[in-house]
Image (spheres, rainbow, N blue to C red):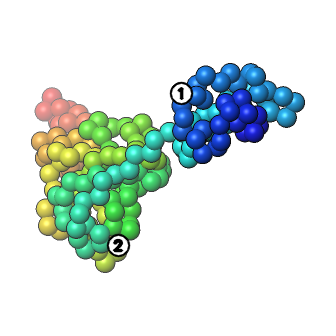
Amino acid sequence: MVKKILQATKSDIKTLIGETTTLKTLKPTAFVDDRFGLPTVTDIISELEKPGRDPRPEFTTANFQDGVEKITDLKPGMVLEATVTNVAAFGAFADIGVHQDGLIHISAMAEKRIARPRQVAKPGHVVKVKVPEVDVPRNRISLTLRLSDPLPQKGERQKSGGGNGKAADRKPPRAEKPDGGGALAAALAKAAERRKSS
């Protein structure tokens, strides 16, 4: 095939490679035969125009922060660029450049509640994450996509479940009912008192 193209252009392979003006004048249909169809001929001419090109789409990668190479280099509050490596039902794992993927829990993936992590992230996505917590002994890195979230206090675990985590947004715990109590018992006691007073 290439020999036919070289004969048609009256040149050698070294001068033809990358010579787009000459290659654009070629009509691929003129080189089609019983061994090579039109798509193959078109691909060969394209390869001669741009040798070594990769037909796959561009792949973007995260720009890892200089000086952050080990899990011990991480500090709570750091904002880093990460590449999502895997998505599971409970969240996504992201590579932040420390040879240990961090977990972005589903509750830390969006401001609003989401049903599935794939609504927010897919493998290969480059995202900005915040490090709320690092557990070096257990080799665990907690990450969040909610960059405005406050950091957990010392000894406090990261809050999950969306919202802003303020006490005013939480329901107070139910008061303990006295023994023998309940709504039915209270109603019966009230009825019994009415009978006594009448």
Q: Amino acid at mark 1?
A: Thr
* Lateral position of residue 58 relative to residue 74, left or right: right
Image: 159 above or below 71: above
**Pick the front one: 164 or 50:** 50
Q: Which residue is mark 2?
A: 139
Q: Quadrant of the N terminus?
A: top right
Image: 57 above or below 174: above
Q: Residue at x 23, y 63 (%)?
A: 66
Q: Amino acid at mark 2?
A: Asn
- What kind of element bears circle 1? helix
Q: Residue at x 80, y 33 (%)?
A: 36
**Pick the front one: 140 or 11:** 11
Q: Position of residue 128 (x, y in %)?
A: 27, 47
Q: Earlier in the sequence, mark 1 or mark 2?
A: 1
The quadrant in which residue 64 appears is bottom left
Circles 1 and 2, Cβ within 8 Å, touching? The answer is no
Total residue callouts: 2
Disc sitting over residue 21 in the figure: 1
